Amino acid sequence: MQIDLNCDLGEAFGNYSCGGDADIIPLITSANIACGFHAGDENVMNETVKLAKEHGVGIGAHPGLPDLKGFGRRNMDIAPNEIYNLVVYQLGALNGFCKIHGTRINHVKPHGALYQMGARDKTIAHAIAQAVYDFDPELIFVGLSNTLLISEAQNVGLKVASEVFADRRYEDDGQLVSRKEKDASITNTEEALNQVIKMVTENKVVSKNGKEIDLQADTICVHGDGAHALEFVTQIRKKLTKEGIDIQSL
C-alpha cells in the first residue's frame, strides 16, 4: 500500500511570509506551488522550485483565481474560456522556473475556490482539465476524490490522482465543508491522524454528520498555511510509516 503526501506551498508574497516551506518540503513527496494569482510571486516560485528539486519532491502547479486579497478562496463569476486562459498562464509561469532549474512540472492541482467550483460544476471542471491537457497531456491532474474534477480530467485524457484531506472535514455528499463554517478545518492532530489512516487503509471518511463515505485516496493534502501544518505533516508521515504504508510521489 502506498500514498503520496502533498502540501500547498510557495504562498508567500512580496514581504509577506506564509508557512514554513523549508521545514515542510523535506517531509512531503509532492509540493503544490502557488503560481502568482492567489499567492506567490516570481521570487517565491523560484525559491520553492529550487527547494523541491533539492529534496526530490514532485513539483505541482497550484493555479488559482486572481484574488490575492481573498487568497483565492472567494468564488468569482468567470467564463470557461477565461478559466482556461488563467490556468494556462499560471502553468507557463511555473514552467519557466522549472526549466531554469532543470526540472519539470509533475502534476496540477487547482487551488481554493477554483478547486471547489470545479468539483461541483462540470463546465468549470472541463475548462480546467482541458487547459492542463493542452499545456501538457502527460501531467497528472489532482482533484477532490469522487467529484467532477476527476471525471472531467479523465474525459479529456489526463492521468488523475484522487485527493483526500487530512485537515478538512467532509459533507455527507463527499464535498469539503465550506470554510465559512466554523467546523470546516481539523486542528486536532489525533483527529487528523485517525482520518488519514481510515482514508488510506479503508478508502472511507466519516462526514461531519457521522456518515461513512467511500472515496479513493491517492494523495493526502495538508494545507501549508494552516497553523498546525508542520506538526500534521510530521506526525502523518510517522503514522503512515508505522502502519507500513509506503509514501511515494505521484
Image (tube, rainbow, N blue to C red):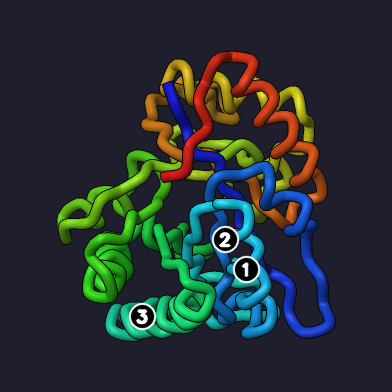
Mark 3 or mark 1, which is nearer the start of the sequence?
A: 1
Disc 2 versus disc 3: distance between alpha carbons? 22 Å
Could you say which quadrant of the image residue 204 lies in?
top left
- Say if 228 sits above or below 202 in the image: below
Residue at the spot of label 3: 88
- Say if 188 sits above or below 34 in the image: above
Left or right relative to 232: residue 101 = left
Of 143 and 27, the residue lying toward us: 27
Could you say which quadrant of the image residue 239 lies in?
top right
In contact (CB < 8 Å): disc 1 and disc 2: yes
Left or right relative to 162: residue 31 = right
- Report the residue at 46% width, 67% height from top: 103
Q: Secondary structure at mark 2?
A: helix
Q: Secondary structure at mark 1?
A: helix
Left or right relative to 46: residue 82 = left
Crowding at dot 1, Cα within 10 Å, few <14 / some 14-19 / many 20+, comes out as some
**Amino acid, disc 3:** Val
**Amino acid, disc 1:** Lys
Residue 107 in percent (x, y) is at 40, 58
- Say if 147 sits above or below 172 in the image: below
Q: Nearer the viewer, mark 1 or mark 3?
A: 1
Could you say which quadrant of the image residue 213 lies in?
top left
The C terminus is located in which quarter?
Answer: top left
**Number of the label disc, if any, that sits on residue 53:** 2
Residue at the spot of label 1: 50
The N terminus is located in which quarter?
Answer: top left
- Report the residue at 70% width, 39% height from top: 233
- Report the residue at 79% width, 38% height from top: 231
**Amino acid, disc 2:** Lys
Q: Nearer the viewer, mark 2 or mark 3?
A: 2
